[in-house]
Image: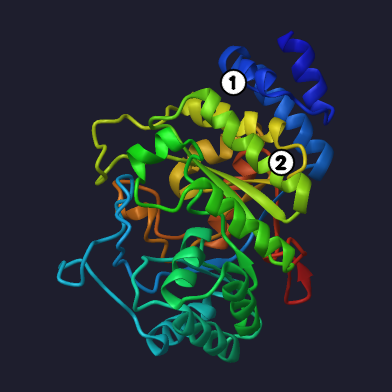
Amino acid sequence: MIDAVLSRAADGGRMTPDEAVALYRDASLADLGTAADAVVRRRVGERISYNVNAHLNPTNICVVGCGFCAFAVWTEKDERAYAYSVDQLVDRATQLSELGITELHIVGGMTKEYDLPYYEELFRELKAALPHVSLTALTAVEVDFIAKVSGVTHREAIERLIAAGHDTMPGGGAEVFSSRVRKIIADRKAPAEVWLDVHREAHRQGLRTNATLLFGHFETPEEQVDHLLRLRGLQDETGGFQAFIPLPFLPGNTDFPYLPGPTREEKLRTIAVARLVLDNVDHIKGHWVMLGEEITSEALSYGLDDLSGTLSEERIAHATTVETPLGLSVSRMETLIRAGGREPAERDTLYGGVSRDGVAA
């Protein structure tokens, strides 16, 4: 049975829930990698895409308080707390633009001071200062929170954010859709249904988005597969997801430091299964900060076809004990891709090609 399912999935066939769980539990890692790699090569050939981007985190003060998060603090009285004004963020973005970025990734804590008018002003000012830079901003749980504190619907919040310059939505906040697991790791966070509804509305308004899975903590293979299938179902409905990003749990400085985090095999197995299950999602993106550079290169043969960018000033994963750099140069990014046996190709936020100095990157 396993060989038949792998063969069908490698050719682009759709798997049932039971088949997906069987692959995760019983297929050899090598066979999973071979099948997932066949999908990638059929879709994109030898090219692995990446973009040149930077992070902006308006604040790390957050009233949600997820147990898995090492980034946020509860109150401004915490010595680690920060909260930036629009002007401060625009100044910093202007400095970061000197790195040649094509995208700003904007996520942060949730607190009532950072409401819809704040983000409208921020997006307008960023677009005025850097019209060539795309804004990949605000997870679905942030959009839900902003809408609530501002007294508007998801629909109105997204309409106003798009009007202000919002280009795409990242996939964070999904964690694991299992209500059992969410009660353990993020009991105050918006439930899975809200995350899915916000992305559904964003897609309805033409906003392309990403999706994620936080894995390697308390979830079971069945719960991982259920998560993937719910994403696949929404993609069947809307077609709005650009990429899926598997995020390995990093236990350092969280409420769960006793957990080991996922092994190399668990990382590669999860990536490969995701590539085979999500037959309607174009890209599986590797977040090298959390995977580690060595496994990221290896995972280019297990289903990854895209990397999360140079990520200058990434702070959220680095609030744990992760040892990856705070950002990668373009040359180091391309070396990482070539170490995995593939050819690098710079892209923009919507997966178009990028040329620099008249030469395609």
The crowd level at tag 1 (other Cα within 10 Å; few <14, some 14-19, many 20+) is many
Colouring method of the image: rainbow
Return the residue at label 2.
Answer: 233
Instruction: Locate residue 333: give its quadrant.
Output: bottom right
Going by the numbered disc 1, the residue's amino acid type is Tyr
Q: Earlier in the sequence, mark 2 or mark 1?
A: 1
Q: Quadrant of residue 258?
A: top left
Mark yes or no: residue 342 visible.
Answer: no
Establish if 234 lies above or below 55: above
> Residue, x 51% and y 31% (percent of image)?
267
Q: Quadrant of residue 39?
A: top right
Instruction: Give the structural element (helix, strand or loop) at label 2.
Output: helix
Label 2 environment density (alpha carbons within 10 Å; few <14, some 14–19, many ≥20): some
**Could you tell whether 347 is left or right of 72 in the image?**
right
Between 14 and 282, the one nearer to me in the picture? 14
Q: Is residue 196 above or below residue 161?
A: above
Horizontal side, residue 296 vs residue 18: left or right: left
Coordinates of residue 116 in the picture (x, y in percent) = 48, 79
Is 73 or 94 nearer to us in this picture? 73
Q: Nearer the viewer, residue 5 or 52?
A: 5
Q: Is residue 275 or residue 75 the one in the foreground?
A: 75
Q: Residue furthest top?
A: 1
Q: What's the residue type where badge 2 is placed?
A: Gly
* Residue that appears at 32% across and 50% down: 66
The span from disc 2 to disc 1 (Cα, nearest Å) is: 20 Å
Give the quadrant of the C terminus.
bottom right
Q: Quadrant of the N terminus?
A: top right
Q: Residue at x 36, y 65 (%)?
A: 109
Q: Where does residue 211 sit, x and y in percent of width and height?
A: 60, 50
Instruction: Identify the residue under disc 1.
Output: 24
Count of numbered circles in the view: 2
